[in-house]
Image (cartoon, rainbow, N blue to C red):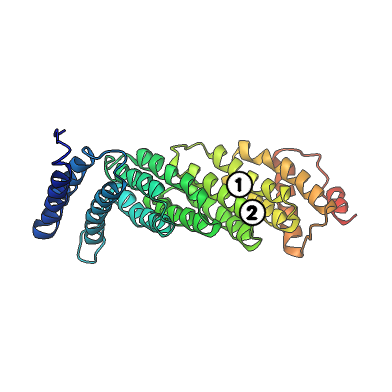
Amino acid sequence: MVNVSRDDYHIVLKCYLELSCLYLKAWKNYQESMKQCIDALELYRNDDVDNLFECYKCLANTFEKQYLEQTSDSAPTPSPSSFHRTSIFPVVRTIIENFIDRADWKTVIILFEHLIQTILKEHNDHLGVDKEFQKVLDICKNLDDSISVETYSSYLEIMLRYRCISHHAQLSAIEPPFCQVLSIYKAYNNTRRVICTYRKFLELIISTITNYATFVDAVQHLALDLETVQLVNEALGMHMRFARFILTCNTKETILKVGFIIVRYRLLAKNGAQFNINYQQAIIELMKHYRNIVESRFIIDDFLKTLKT
């Protein structure tokens, strides 16, 4: 760190920023351009908000130039880890613009700090990148609900592409039910549930869990959450999807869940859920499976009568 007298403080800061612009515009040396900004940041005084903002803006602009070059049609395809970091950049910049419109400079600087920390993470440190972005998401609580939801939506899209879920059997299996539940809560303008569902899905995507039972439980909880908010028909549809999910897994551990689903069907019927012909046929198939593997004395006709009473 350079020791600078108070008289020379602003002159040195200006030199650093001008050097940063020179490296960027004249030579497209992004790393050196960012280094000049980081060196300048080490000089700033806590009460110098205006200059601190200008430095962060300069640093962010440098990274944006690099991001645009990397994502241009002529640029080589970035690695998944590089894609993860660079794709987050425009999402955070959009949030920053919202706080700039509010003239909330303290929050703007905090967001820039998280953005820079994200940029400086190692290429393969996806957990570190996520940790920084989670801090940004927490700050989004101070924005309008629509902005928070849009931010979570953008981040989910980034993570789905980053994790290449088409090559991940468990994630590929749970994506449709999670997306369906998100659509349901959005249709009912239940923002709290929308954000909660985004968080649960993102946790599964980011984690390194490979235990299939964890993903089975996640889908089961989606159906139970719909019951909690008394969306009985939607909950029934999700339990049906859960049943198909279990039959696809076809393991002893997951088949034992069938008994739970049968109980939920009975409760949903009492609460007014509508069982159409397709649902009834699917239930019969599920119960046959349950009888053949788990409980040979299970009487299907007796159960179907309970759905009609």
Q: Residues within 10 Å of mark 2 (few under 14, many from 20)?
A: some
In-front residue for pair 190/309: 190
In-front residue for pair 44/221: 44
**Where residue 126 sits in the image (x, y, percent)?**
35, 41
Whether residue 243 appears in this view of the structure is: yes
The numbered dot on residue 241 is: 2
Q: Is residue 210 left or right of residue 112?
A: right
Tag 1: amino acid: Val
In-front residue for pair 151/1: 1
Tag 2: amino acid: Arg
- The residue at which mark 1 appears reads as 219
| Occupied quadrant, residue 62 | bottom left
Give the label, 1 or 2, closer to the camera.
Answer: 1
* Quadrant where the image shows the C terminus: bottom right
In-front residue for pair 215/252: 215
Q: Residue furthest bottom?
A: 73
Please, what secondary structure does the residue beneath circle 2 have? Answer: helix
Please, what secondary structure does the residue beneath circle 1 have? Answer: helix
Q: Is residue 176 left or right of residue 284?
A: left
In percent of the image, x 12 and y 48: which residue is there?
15
Q: Which comes before the other along the chain, label 1 or label 2? A: 1
Q: Residue furthest front?
A: 7
Q: CA distance from mark 1 to mark 2?
A: 9 Å
**Where residue 203 sits in the image (x, y, percent)?**
49, 42
Q: Residue furthest right?
A: 309
Are circles 1 and 2 on residues that touch, CB within 8 Å? yes
Does 241 sit above or below residue 40?
Answer: below
Q: Residues within 10 Å of mark 1 (few under 14, many from 20)?
A: many
